[in-house]
Image: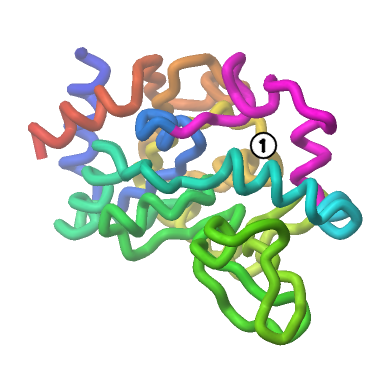
């Protein structure tokens, strides 16, 4: 694994490291991704999953939305894996500045990471659309049907649905982190989800590394591309740092 050895040497030399991750980081915990041949978007439903996970569908077909959401996005029984754990250890040691994630499972924080920028929100946070009261994920996943607030309002997950924009503050912080680091490690993402994928264009540091099982539209931009399981790579990083 010469390519991983190169990455490890860059990690040891870097002054500021940022990790940018996607669904592939969590699939090794047992969660399904969205776009692979076995992903959620290739399963058969009464409605296309992309439509179910849209703002208009949530508003108009709330009950159907929650049937899918509670069936497919519940992380109960799943735990952070080696990648989440090593990234948290790197942050604790002062080696990693931040994690920027497209995932909504909250595994990075569960593993111990503190500076996590969640581009697409989190299933761990839920709010009443009427009074804005906060609820954790149990209020959604453990209830029957559509979850309601004590005030009677409908509870909505704090996740970015299709037709909704990303949080401007999170975007600003993510771009700042990427543009000021000298080593950007991109992992477990096909880099096909926009606008998130375009953020890596703000990188002007020394080395940009991509770890992903398949090819991406940005492979040619990277200084090092590792087409391996991200968990295997981080297992080796754990031994060396």
- The residue under the point 29% across, 28% down is 231
**Which residue is more in the foreground, 72 or 35?**
72
Q: Which residues are magenta?
A: 31-54
Q: Position of residue 71 (x, y in %)?
A: 60, 41
The question of residue 37 being in magenta is answered with: yes
The answer to whether residue 211 is visible is: yes
Q: Position of residue 2 (x, y in %)?
A: 20, 14
- The residue under the point 30% across, 58% down is 113
Image side of residue 178 versus residue 238, left or right: right
The question of residue 155 being in magenta is answered with: no
Q: Quadrant of the N terminus?
A: top left
- The residue under the point 53% across, 59% down is 142
Residue 38 is drawn in which quadrant? top right
**Which residue is more in the foreground, 241 or 37?**
37
In the displayed structure, would residue 6 be above or below residue 84? Answer: above
In the displayed structure, would residue 144 be above or below residue 234? Answer: below
Q: Residues within 10 Å of mark 1 (few under 14, many from 20)?
A: few
For label 1, the SS is loop
- The residue under the point 81% across, 56% down is 62
Image side of residue 194 versus residue 223, left or right: right
Residue 194 is drawn in which quadrant? top right
Image side of residue 153 versus residue 210, left or right: right
| Colouring | rainbow
- Counting labels gives 1
Assign the magenta stretch its main secondary structure. loop
In the displayed structure, would residue 107 be above or below residue 52? Answer: below
Q: Position of residue 88 (x, y in %)?
A: 25, 52
Q: Quadrant of the C terminus?
A: top left
The answer to whether residue 175 is visible is: no
Q: Position of residue 118 (x, y in %)?
A: 52, 57
Q: Which residue is mark 1?
A: 193
């Amino acid at each position: 694994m010469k390519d991983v050895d190169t990455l490890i040497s860059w990690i040891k030399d870097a002054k500021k490291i940022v990790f940018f991750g996607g669904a592939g980081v969590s699939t090794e915990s047992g969660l399904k991704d969205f776009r692979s041949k076995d992903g959620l978007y290739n399963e058969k439903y009464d409605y296309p999953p992309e439509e179910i996970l849209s703002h208009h569908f949530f508003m108009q077909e709330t009950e159907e939305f929650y049937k899918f959401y509670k069936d497919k996005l519940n992380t109960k029984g799943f735990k952070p894996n080696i990648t989440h754990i090593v990234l948290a250890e790197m942050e604790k040691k002062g080696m990693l500045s931040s994690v920027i994630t497209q995932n909504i499972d909250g595994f990075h924080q569960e593993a111990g990471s503190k500076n996590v920028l969640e581009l697409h929100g989190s299933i761990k946070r839920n709010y009443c659309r009427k009074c804005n009261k906060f609820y954790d994920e149990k209020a959604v996943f453990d209830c029957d049907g559509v979850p309601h607030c004590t005030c009677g309002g409908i509870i909505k997950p704090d996740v970015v649905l299709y037709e909704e924009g990303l949080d401007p503050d999170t975007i600003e912080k993510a771009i700042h982190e990427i543009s000021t680091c000298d080593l950007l490690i991109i992992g477990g993402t096909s880099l096909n989800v926009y606008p998130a994928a375009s953020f890596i264009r703000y990188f002007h540091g020394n080395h940009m590394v991509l770890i992903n099982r398949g090819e991406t539209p940005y492979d040619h931009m990277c200084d090092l591309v590792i087409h391996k399981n991200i968990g295997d790579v981080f297992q080796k990083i754990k031994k060396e740092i």
